[in-house]
Image (tube, coloured by chain):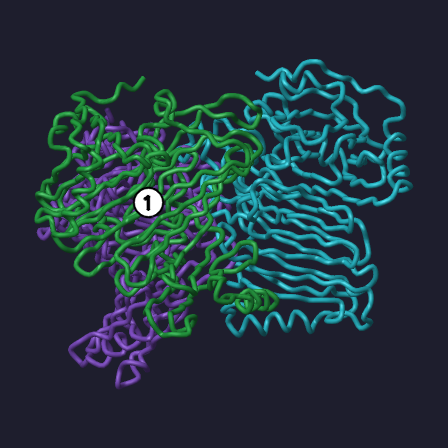
Chain colours: A purple, B green, C cyan
Amino acid sequence: MRRTPLHLVSILLLLHSTADGAEPYREKLTSTELGLHMDEWKVSNYDILSKSKPPFSVKKITLHGGKQEGVDLITVDNGAIKLTVIPTRGMGLWQVEAGQVRLGWNSPVKEVVHPKFINLQTRGGLGWLEGFNECLVRCGLEWAGHPGKDKFLNNVGEEAEMDLTLHGKIANLPASEVEVLIDRLPPYRIRVRGRVDERMFYGPKLELWTEISTEPGSNAFRIADTLRNAGALDQEFQIIYHANFGAPLLEQGAQLVAPVKRVTPFNGHAAKFVNRYGTYEGPTKGFIEQVYCLHPLADGKNRTIFLLRNANGDRAVSLGFSTDQLPYVTLWKNTNAGEEGYVTGVEPGTGFPYNRRLERLAGRVPKLAAGASREFSIEFNIYTNRNDVQKVSEQIAAIQAGRQPQMDAEPLKVE
Amino acid sequence: MRRTPLHLVSILLLLHSTADGAEPYREKLTSTELGLHMDEWKVSNYDILSKSKPPFSVKKITLHGGKQEGVDLITVDNGAIKLTVIPTRGMGLWQVEAGQVRLGWNSPVKEVVHPKFINLQTRGGLGWLEGFNECLVRCGLEWAGHPGKDKFLNNVGEEAEMDLTLHGKIANLPASEVEVLIDRLPPYRIRVRGRVDERMFYGPKLELWTEISTEPGSNAFRIADTLRNAGALDQEFQIIYHANFGAPLLEQGAQLVAPVKRVTPFNGHAAKFVNRYGTYEGPTKGFIEQVYCLHPLADGKNRTIFLLRNANGDRAVSLGFSTDQLPYVTLWKNTNAGEEGYVTGVEPGTGFPYNRRLERLAGRVPKLAAGASREFSIEFNIYTNRNDVQKVSEQIAAIQAGRQPQMDAEPLKVE
Amino acid sequence: MRRTPLHLVSILLLLHSTADGAEPYREKLTSTELGLHMDEWKVSNYDILSKSKPPFSVKKITLHGGKQEGVDLITVDNGAIKLTVIPTRGMGLWQVEAGQVRLGWNSPVKEVVHPKFINLQTRGGLGWLEGFNECLVRCGLEWAGHPGKDKFLNNVGEEAEMDLTLHGKIANLPASEVEVLIDRLPPYRIRVRGRVDERMFYGPKLELWTEISTEPGSNAFRIADTLRNAGALDQEFQIIYHANFGAPLLEQGAQLVAPVKRVTPFNGHAAKFVNRYGTYEGPTKGFIEQVYCLHPLADGKNRTIFLLRNANGDRAVSLGFSTDQLPYVTLWKNTNAGEEGYVTGVEPGTGFPYNRRLERLAGRVPKLAAGASREFSIEFNIYTNRNDVQKVSEQIAAIQAGRQPQMDAEPLKVE
């Protein structure tokens, strides 16, 4: 704990002492309100549960050197999987280690880059790519898609034009409040929560409370975010959950298994390969990204499941979510050579990653009223045997229910 | 004190030991020349005066967490009011607490944002708004007004074009030298001084020594800055003192009381409301800023006073300054809903906040010769009863001396 | 050593204990792989050699205050000269102190500016000039020359346009790995090595291992860099070694002595003075830079020597290098008034500093194949008496061998 005034320590101790069985364990790791930032910190089941089982730990470190000087990392080890979150980069999920399955990928960006070294406006608005190596990175909040011009209201209330940058700002903003909560009663859910603010004068006042949680011993974890418009006026927003997977899950013959109503190529290049959109190639030097806009089908409760499985069908990861919250999924295939980034993205969102100007024309830019909130959650499950992969594939087939998806030969007409 | 070589400690001790009654107490808190940066520090009347009265203290802290990681704050508590200065943000004045009056405002920007998280070029040059929440922020030094293109001489000596950004760079530059001085003799004036440099190769070599000072027990404080051209060539400059006030001083019926020769709306929108330019509305959702260009009247010594008073006329703040130094005042009315920023700016300057290109055409961009300096000072007084507000209002009326201001129905002709 | 996990300390101790006479002493000062960053550190001959002679030391400090908060400096004192390297600024060489000769210059930029305070895109792409004060700064790696538009392949594999910024990014990137190596056997060469990465997704994957080295008691030092393309595809690159010298070496009557085949003015302004390109004026207020493109001659092994000598011919510095590695030299004359920067640059490179688009047209933008490397080295020698200056001048004359250089009256035709 760095330079924390003594009265804050007292407050923190008080917070702990009031906790009983009904109250979760709670620790603030970063707080701009309290002037608090812990450089290193750790807690384990031994510290907070009367019985020593199940074993788990949560650990905070600060990275040093190069472009990662000062970057915070929080690792939750639930005994089965290890999740590493990056508070300094918008609470993104760096990677998940789960035995033989690792969620994440080997990006050519080797460091966990501090936002102070990122200029989103470089390279015609592609500066975001200088820090991109997360397993799950949120795109948003004021905009989430491709760079390019869009209009906005400036300080004198006039319509002006600005350059949007790739995938928005949220992934390069540090969390203002970070806390760890652990239930003291079974199943002892462990939560890492962080608030990332996209606030400015004469602009959005968006607050995103992110949460990533898991249970000891589980192969699953959950994202559960709440986005709030803290301004006095209606506010447009966009959010895309850019989940990225590389080898060994991704390999030649790996497949996306998902219930879809319609598949549309993002551009002319992707259109050439739309008929095999759900199947992956091995690392292919010079591969150009192929992107598909998917309209998911869902069950009676508007839940859907997207599954990425390996060629053998004995390893997989699934994303379960509500199509009310996240009605669109972008599939990003980038099976380039390993050095360039062999990776695929499965990206549920409130829209597709076209420039906001185009998304608005297509009616995919929602608004939040003053003071209003929206929730977004995604359940991730990791499968490590054929039987489990088979079972979830059957669930997906049940949602598809034999309906043929519409396969578009041409990109969405934009403009 | 962080990582200060021992010989520097000796130098500092020497500085102290040479101080006697005639020499002020002096402490360097930041010095790029000495490689010095203090994370935390405090001094009070008990430490430096033989008698324990009057009570006062000066305290330095470093903020942590989110976008304020590493931001320095210095708070002067003179026993009557508390001034908080931000060395990391160009020696801006964050707020002044004075019992029931607070100078400052509730910006939608909640953190004291470190410049490393600010890109002035975003949003068409409006990135400055991502950190804007100060009570007093300096605009300048190479330019101080609205974004837009302007010409400059580039590295090969040719006229080139660059994008100016809103209100210039000075508020997002950290001070290179920071020191606290306290007179050992009555009235024990307390000074926080800091040098902010706008220096570059093939560009300006401007150094601004800022000073904010007050006396124990006083309701007043003073800005006294010296701007120096450290280059070998003439140098254009602009400076605007953007002083910002919100509730409770600002409220429906609050008034600007000021001696003016001429009032000109900044744009067509402001022109519609020019006849009530000096009166404020309550928080109004969707209010569009109204800006007025004021030409102040002054007394025989070219001193003028601008007063912002509440509706009741029993709370107020005044700015006293020389129209030789600061011949123009911009009045910025932004009585929007609280969540959007309910605030007004009273902004003495060397010009108005039009883009520098337009200000140059209007003859309002001064130059400093090589090695030359200019001084700028503003006296702030806080009033907490009707009698005092009345008295200063009478002073202002005496300067106006019954002269009718010219009220322009149209904006200044620009270009 | 800051926040280094204990197992890393063990690794470091092991590294040391395995070292014998044959293995150099080796210490990691920064490592993103190990999560290591030392704030302060020092080693001297007493620590690592059995005999106490020759005396030398290597010292690491971290700067504080203003725009240099957090900047690393490493100073090698070899007993004769002191070299100061800036790991935080791309391993640039800040200055060399050598008794009465100092390599370096007095820039109007007074601080060693942390990249977090630099925005390369400001001022029409001239933001680099806000941090420029090094004795040797590398320009590159993706581009190295003047700002302006150039094409590139974007994320969807299409040709897009981007704004290049002056002299590229490398000087404003912090080194990811930094280490000091010292031979345990004569001549006890001392090496400061650092790896600076210009890596991104959908962009270059260039790694530059820099090395600066010297021997105890020597007046010479050596740059020896290795550039590697870590991507899977061919990659363009540019590198220019921007070596800068001011007073007292630079003075009225100082001369560049160099074997040249051809001298071409960079632009029309320089063309006017091409006939005295090798002679310097004293500080001249308002001097506009004069730049010359030089094609060096070399000896039978393709080695050449460029010498900058004072007016008296009793102080000088030389750069020796291979024209296979660095076939072009840019001479930058900027004998402006001291406050503006009185300086000349002698700049061996893979090309001239025209915008990359123009350099490509001229065939001066090399490519590195996937996995391929290139080496660049320059030997610097400092001379402090007439005799030594005379001897190296004769070496240069021998390379010139009486051949008359082609003196172009017009700039290179670009476009």
Give the residue drawn at x 41%, y 32%: A124
Tell me the quarter of the image containing the C terminus of chain B. top left
Quarter occupied by residue B270: top left
Give the residue drawn at x 81%, y 53%: C218
| In this view, B56 is above or below C350 | below
Give the residue drawn at x 17%, y 47%: B391
Question: Could you tell me if residue B336 is visible in this image?
Answer: yes
Q: Residue B307 location, x and y as percent?
A: 20, 43
Three-letter code, disc 1: Ile
Q: Residue B116 location, x and y as percent?
A: 41, 49
Quarter occupied by residue C361: top right
| In this view, B247 is above or below C32 | above
| In this view, B196 is above or below C186 | above
**Total of numbered circles in the picture?**
1
Give the residue drawn at x 19%, y 80%: A18
Compared across the picture, whether A169 is left or right of A258 comes to right
Chain bearing mark 1: B
Element at badge 1?
Answer: strand
Q: Residue C9 location, x and y as percent?
A: 57, 72
Residue identified by numbered label 1: B378
Seen as rendered, the residue at the extreme top is C409
Seen as rendered, the residue at the extreme front is B300
Quarter occupied by residue C380: top right
| In this view, B282 is above or below C405 | below
Q: Residue B253 location, x and y as percent?
A: 8, 43
Residue in the foreground of this view, choosing between B111 and C87 = B111
Few, some or many C-alpha atoms within 10 Å of disc 1 (few <14, some 14-19, many ≥20)? many
Question: Could you tell me if residue A136 is visible in this image?
Answer: no
